[in-house]
Amino acid sequence: MNAADLLVACLEREGVEHVFGLPGEETDDLLFALRDSDVTFVPVRHEQGAAFMADVHGRLTGEAGVCLATLGPGATNLLTGVADAHLDKSPLVAITAQAGLERLHKESHQALDIVNMFESVTKWNTTIRDPDIVNEAARKAFKLAEYEKPGATHLELPEDIAAQGTVGEPLPERGPVPRPRPNEDAVDAAADLLAEADRPVVLAGNGAVRARSSDQLREFVTEHGVPVVSTYMGKGAVSDANDHSLMTLDSGDGAAQDALAAADLVVAVGYDIAEHDPASFHRSGVPIIHIDSEPAEVYEAYDPAVELVADIAHSLDALAGRADAGFDGAWFDEYRERIVDRVLDADPRGNAPFSVDGVLPVVRDALGDEDVLVSDVGNHKMSIAQRYPTYAPNTCIISNGLASMGIAVPGAVSADLAVDGNVLAATGDGGFLMNAAELETATRLGCSFTVLVFRDDDYGLISAKQQRDRGQSFGTRLSNPDFVAFAESFGVNATRPETRDALETAIGDAVASDDLELVEVPLVSRGPNQ
């Protein structure tokens, strides 16, 4: 057994089913070890796609997704997806090759200081300089990637070390490390704040979904009559069908922000300030109870009065057991009504060009409660975040930590491999073409998801902001290929509906299909800019 064989044996021991990546000369030992293993190597078309696949796998399953790249440009191409996992708190293990140790002390072909490059976007990363430490390094990479708060880790394996023999054995996979229960004094202080409040609001963040605490959160808000507003990444922590849901920040004509402005206490559950700047919604002087697995970031606009730093589910149970009887929910009924009316008020436009807001009810009707929508980043993401009701955790995947374009198609590939239900990738024309080549990966794997491409020939989110701030836009206009012909060239079924009836039929048929499908949705164009 050489070091590469041992590393792959460690992946098997960790329960890894897929490694997403690109081959390279320096990864030969790893690739042939993978060939002879129970782990499936998935060659992709760009390393960024591989990292996004691993990222979304981790987000959906709680188990680290794995991506592989060679040295130099392979490693640099991984970086965006690894950074996305880092800021979105998604467990991911990145593996990169490196030149032999004998040439790393000098300028050398394709040799970069990859470990230092990855330092700011990982929880931990290292170079394996001894074949006998592979087992320890692999176990540590997975343990840290998956432990709350999860994130990315990175292993660099030089090609000469990969080929060296070792007598090491994979370390046993261990169960999750138990997270601590909340401090009793902190629970008492939080309960006192809750008892003094008349209009508390829960702010559900990424951790409320990620920490698998949605059942406890739903019980807390329902039993105590507390409304809940979700961040974009907290969607589904409490079903939007629940009468206590005020859906997401920014939704419903500002009603969610209005509810937060009217609140006299904010209970932040699993919220990271990287998701949404608290300065945009938090009213100064209103106390905050911070419930999370780590202490709050120091920020003037987010300065909790009490911090319950422990397992989120345990903290919610403890607070619910210590809190007094429920609150009168009548105060937030108006906000709920405004939000529901806004979300259900579909664009009446019948034929193309359509609007994203008008298309989303069709998407919602086509997808089941447990089906997964993976959103790319762009103008459509804002509509999905605000106007796509979500009924279960991890069924609306939105990147809002790094918020990187290009995640939807590769993310849908790994989602299709990870979940039993239907998967839909919603993307703009800008984000789609960043990683559209992964359609070939999807067809090769026999994936059966739907790609919904909103086409407005524009970087619409930036254009809209420029128009709002300056009354004009610049540098945002695009030209596009015929997306239907483009998809069909990959062997993907594709259509471009021009009427409302055709739109409903196209989306419904695509979601129900066992094939890979693409639906191009022409949007209202903002016209030319220079």
Image (cartoon, rainbow, N blue to C red):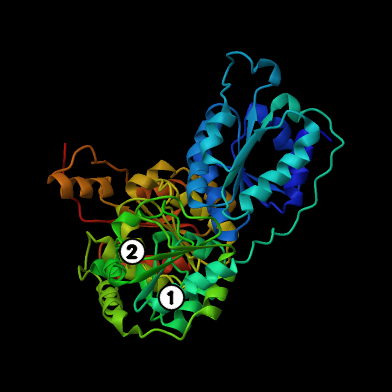
Q: Which residue is mark 2?
A: 249
Q: Quadrant of the C terminus?
A: top left
Please report the residue visible at 64 percent of the width from the left and 48 percent of the height from the top: 144
Q: Secondary structure at mark 2?
A: loop
Give whichever of 238, 183 is nearer the camera: 183
C-alpha separation, residue under disc 2 versus residue under disc 1? 22 Å
Please report the residue visible at 27 percent of the width from the left and 49 percent of the height from the top: 461
Give whichever of 410, 160 is nearer the camera: 160
Q: Which residue is mark 1?
A: 194
Q: Residue furthest top?
A: 106
Mark 2 vs mark 1: which is more N-terminal? 1
Q: Quadrant of the N terminus?
A: top right
Above or below, comparing residue 183 to residue 486 in the picture = below
Left or right side of 288 for 21: right
Residues at discs 2 and 1 in contact (Cβ within 8 Å): no
Closer to the eye: label 2 or 1: 1
Q: Residue furthest left?
A: 471
